[in-house]
Image (spheres, rainbow, N blue to C red):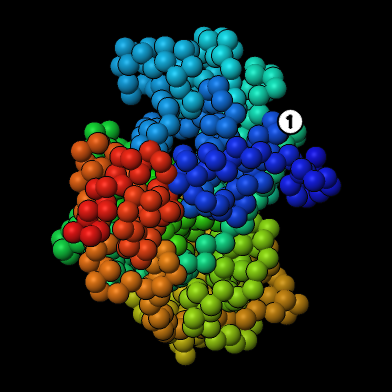
C-alpha cells in the first residue's frame, strides 16, 4: 500500500498495517520507554508487516529503535548493514547493555573472534548481527546466512547508496541484490538526510520501487542557524569557540592542513582541540574520537571524514570554517549538534574563495557529466541558502520539500537584514567585469570599485578606467557582499581555476537591461540571542540539580571507562536529567525513568540511586 493511503478496520493503524501488541512489551522491557517517539510506530508496524521501508528521520529522532525493536519482536537473526566499524561496535555495546544479544563481524576483529561470533549466530544465540556491505555481499556469507531464519535486513546510513547523495559509497550499490538473495525478508533503509532525488534513487536501486517511504520531518528547531562573512577564518573560529567556553563542539574544515592549523591555533588559545582527518594514523584517529565522545568540553576539528555515526548528545555547536558541498551535507553535519534537544548553534563562514574551491572540486571530479551538473545545481542551492534574505530554516526545509513558517531562531529572524534597491550597484559591477575582460577575482574588483591605487592597478592602466572608484561610496565589505549575492543569483559565475575570476553568468543580461530586479542585503550587526536552556523535564535545572547532574555524568563516565564503551551507551544525557528532576527513591521509581530498561535497571539502577541520594 503506498504511503499516504489509509486503511479501515479495527486492527489496523492509520498506515494500514496490523497492530503488533508485543512491540509495547519490547519497547518497555528492552529499551525502557513507555511510548514511541513521533514517526517511529508507523515504521515499526510496516516492518513487522514484512513491508520494505525507507525511513528518513532527523538526527536524534530514534532511527536505530525502528529496526532494533522489530528485530527483537520478529525473532531469528536480523542483519544490520553499517559503513563504519566504530559505529557497529558502539551500537552492539549499547544493545548488550540493554540486555540484547547483538554482535558484529568485521575486519577489526581477529579471525578467531569472528568465527566464535558466527557459531553463536548459527546456533540462534544472536538477535542482531552487524556487517559491512562488503562482507554481507560475499557469496560465502550469503550462502551461510540463507540457512538461517533471517527476520529483517536494515541498511543504516542509506544515503550512501545513491550517487546523488553526499556520501556515496560504491560498495553500497551491490545491496540492491538483497531482495533476490533473501526473498520475502523485509528490507529497511534508514538515513537522516535525503532530498527528493536521493530518496527516489534509493527507492529504485535498493527496492525496485517496492517500498513505503516515511519522511518524518527535517526540522531541528533547537539549532540556531547562522551564516557569516568569512574574512580571517582562523580568528573568526577562535572568537566563536571562545564564547562557548567549556562546551563540546565540532569545527569542520575543507582540508587536512586547515584541520591541523585550526586545531593548533585553538590549543594555543587555551581551548582543548583535537584533530581528525583521513591522513592520520588510524590509532590516533580512534583515540581522538574516543576522547571526544567520552570527555566533556573537547572541540573536534575535522574534515568530513568525521561524524558518521557519532552519537554524542551534548555537542553544543557545529562550525563550518568552509562551506560544505551541499545543503544535504550541511544538514547532516549540523545534525550532530543538540541531539539532547537543548539549544545548539550551527555557524557557517562563507566567502567567494569557498565557491571557487567547490566549483573546482566539481569540475575535477571523476564522474559522469550528469553528476557534475547535479552537483553544480546543488551548490547553487547552497549559495542561495547562504545569501537568503528571509528565514534560513524556511529555505533549508524547503530544499527537502518541507513547508514551515519563520523560525525565530536563525540570524535573519533574530536580526532581519536591511534590503535596498541594488540595480545600480549590480549594473556597475557587471559593467566593470565585462570591461576588464572577465579575468579578475573578487579582491581585485573590489579594489577597483573603491578606488584603491596599487602598482598592479597602475601597471594595468585600470586606474584610468571610467568606472575606477565609481563605487567609492560603499565600504569593501558591502561590495564583497554584493559580489556574493550576484554569484548566488547566477548573475556572476566564480571560475573554478587558479585565479578565481568572476565571469558574467546566465542572469547578468537581465539585470543589465533592467528586466530583472536586484536587491542588496546590507551587512548587519547581529544581536546576541537570548540564551535558552531546558532539561528533559522541560524546565531549567537549578544550581543544586546541576551539581547532581555533574555527579551523575562523572559516575557514567567511570562506568563507561570500565566497560570500554562511549558514555552515552550507559545512559543518554536526557535520562540522567530526568533522574535529577524525578529524584527516584527506589528501583521501582527508577524503572519509570525514560531510557531505563530492565537490563540497565539491574546493571546500574542501584548505583545511580546511591549517587542521587548520596
- Secondary element type, mark 1: loop
Name the side, left or right, on which 460 lies relative to 568: right
The image shows residue 204 at horizontal and vertical percentages of 71, 34
Q: Badge 1: how crowded within 10 Å, few (<14), some, or many (20+)?
A: few
Residue 340, above or below 191: below
- Which residue is most to the bottom? 473
Can the viewer see residue 225? yes
Can the viewer see residue 443? no
> Which quadrant would the C terminus be assigned to in this image?
bottom left
Which quarter of the figure has residue 429? bottom right
Judging by the rendered image, the residue that carries numbered circle 1 is 208
The image shows residue 606 at horizontal and vertical percentages of 27, 47
| Residue at 69% over, 79% down | 517
| Residue at 56% over, 70% down | 392
The image shows residue 9 at horizontal and vertical percentages of 83, 45
Which quarter of the figure has residue 218? bottom right
Residue 281, above or below 521: above
- Front-most of residues 155 and 525: 155
Which quarter of the figure has residue 100? top left
The image shows residue 401 at horizontal and vertical percentages of 68, 58
- Count of numbered badges drawn on the protein: 1
> Which quadrant would the N terminus be assigned to in this image?
top right
- Front-most of residues 552 and 500: 552
| Residue at 65% over, 51% down | 215
Name the side, left or right, on which 44 lies relative to 460: right
Amino acid at each position: 500500500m503506498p504511503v499516504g493511503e489509509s486503511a479501515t478496520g479495527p486492527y489496523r493503524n492509520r498506515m494500514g498495517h496490523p497492530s503488533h501488541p508485543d512491540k509495547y512489551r519490547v519497547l518497555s522491557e528492552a529499551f525502557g520507554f513507555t511510548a514511541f517517539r513521533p514517526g517511529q510506530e508507523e515504521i515499526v508496524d510496516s516492518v513487522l508487516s514484512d513491508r520494505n521501508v525507507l525511513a528518513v528521520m532527523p538526527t536524534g529522532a530514534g532511527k536505530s529503535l525502528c529496526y532494533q525493536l522489530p528485530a527483537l519482536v520478529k525473532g531469528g537473526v536480523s542483519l544490520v548493514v553499517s559503513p563504519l566499524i566504530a559505529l557497529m561496535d558502539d551500537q552492539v555495546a549499547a544493545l548488550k547493555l540493554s540486555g540484547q544479544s547483538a554482535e558484529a563481524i568485521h575486519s577489526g576483529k581477529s579471525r578467531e573472534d569472528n568465527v566464535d561470533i558466527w557459531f553463536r549466530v548459527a546456533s540462534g544465540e544472536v538477535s542482531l548481527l552487524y556487517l559491512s556491505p562488503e562482507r554481507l555481499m560475499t557469496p560465502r556469507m550469503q550462502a551461510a546466512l540463507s540457512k538461517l531464519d533471517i527476520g529483517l535486513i536494515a541498511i543504516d546510513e542509506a544515503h550512501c547508496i545513491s550517487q546523488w547523495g553526499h556520501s556515496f559509497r560504491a560498495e553500497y550499490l551491490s545491496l540492491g541484490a538483497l531482495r533476490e538473495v533473501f526473498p520475502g525478508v523485509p528490507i529497511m533503509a534508514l538515513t537522516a538526510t535525503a532530498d527528493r532525488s536521493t530518496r527516489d534513487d534509493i527507492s529504485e536501486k535498493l527496492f525496485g520501487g517496492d517500498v513505503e517511504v516515511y519522511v518524518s520531518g527535517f526540522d531541528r528547531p533547537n539549532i540556531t542557524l547562522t551564516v557569516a562573512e568569512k574574512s580571517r577564518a582562523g580568528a573568526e573560529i577562535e572568537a566563536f569557540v571562545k564564547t562557548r567556553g567549556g562546551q563540546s563542539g565540532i569545527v569542520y574544515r575543507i582540508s587536512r592542513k586547515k584541520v591541523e592549523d585550526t586545531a593548533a591555533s585553538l590549543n594555543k588559545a587555551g581551548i582543548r582541540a583535537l584533530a581528525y582527518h583521513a591522513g592520520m594514523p588510524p590509532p590516533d584517529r580512534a583515540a581522538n574520537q574516543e576522547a571526544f565522545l567520552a570527555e566533556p568540553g573537547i572541540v573536534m576539528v575535522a574534515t568530513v571524514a568525521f561524524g558518521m555515526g557519532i552519537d554524542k548528545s551534548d555537542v553544543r555547536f557545529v562550525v563550518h570554517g568552509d562551506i560544505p558541498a551541499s545543503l544535504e551535507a550541511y544538514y547532516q553535519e549540523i545534525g550532530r549538534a543538540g541531539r539532547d534537544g537543548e539549544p545548539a548553534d550551527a555557524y557557517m563562514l562563507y566567502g567567494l574563495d569557498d565557491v571557487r574551491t567547490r566549483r573546482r572540486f566539481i569540475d575535477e571530479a571523476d564522474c559522469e557529466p550528469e553528476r557534475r551538473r547535479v552537483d553544480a545545481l546543488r551548490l547553487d542551492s547552497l549559495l542561495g541558502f547562504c545569501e537568503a534574505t528571509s528565514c534560513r530554516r524556511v529555505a533549508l526545509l524547503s530544499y527537502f520539500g518541507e513547508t514551515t513558517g519563520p523560525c525565530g531562531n536563525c540570524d535573519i529572524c533574530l536580526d532581519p537584514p536591511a534590503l535596498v534597491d541594488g540595480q545600480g550597484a549590480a549594473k556597475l559591477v557587471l559593467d566593470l567585469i565585462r570591461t576588464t575582460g572577465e579575468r579578475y577575482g573578487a579582491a581585485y574588483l573590489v579594489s577597483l570599485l573603491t578606488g584603491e591605487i596599487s602598482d598592479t592597478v597602475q601597471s594595468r592602466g585600470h586606474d584610468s578606467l571610467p568606472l575606477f572608484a565609481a563605487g567609492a561610496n560603499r565600504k569593501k565589505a558591502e561590495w564583497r557582499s554584493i559580489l556574493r549575492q550576484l554569484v548566488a543569483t547566477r548573475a556572476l559565475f566564480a571560475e573554478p581555476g587558479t585565479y578565481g575570476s568572476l565571469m558574467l553568468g546566465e542572469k547578468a543580461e537581465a539585470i543589465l537591461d533592467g528586466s530583472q530586479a536586484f536587491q542588496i542585503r546590507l551587512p548587519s550587526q547581529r544581536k546576541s540571542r537570548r540564551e535558552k536552556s531546558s532539561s528533559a523535564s522541560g524546565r531549567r535545572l537549578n544550581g543544586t540539580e546541576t551539581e547532581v547532574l555533574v555527579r551523575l555524568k562523572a559516575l557514567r563516565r567511570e562506568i563507561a571507562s570500565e566497560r570500554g564503551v562511549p558514555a552515552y551507551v550507559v545512559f543518554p544525557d536526557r535520562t540522567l536529567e530526568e533522574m535529577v528532576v524525578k529524584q527516584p527513591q527506589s528501583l521501582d521509581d527508577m524503572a519509570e525513568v525514560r531510557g531505563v530498561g530492565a537490563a540497565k535497571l539491574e546493571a546500574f539502577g542501584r548505583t545511580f540511586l546511591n549517587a542521587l541520594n548520596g
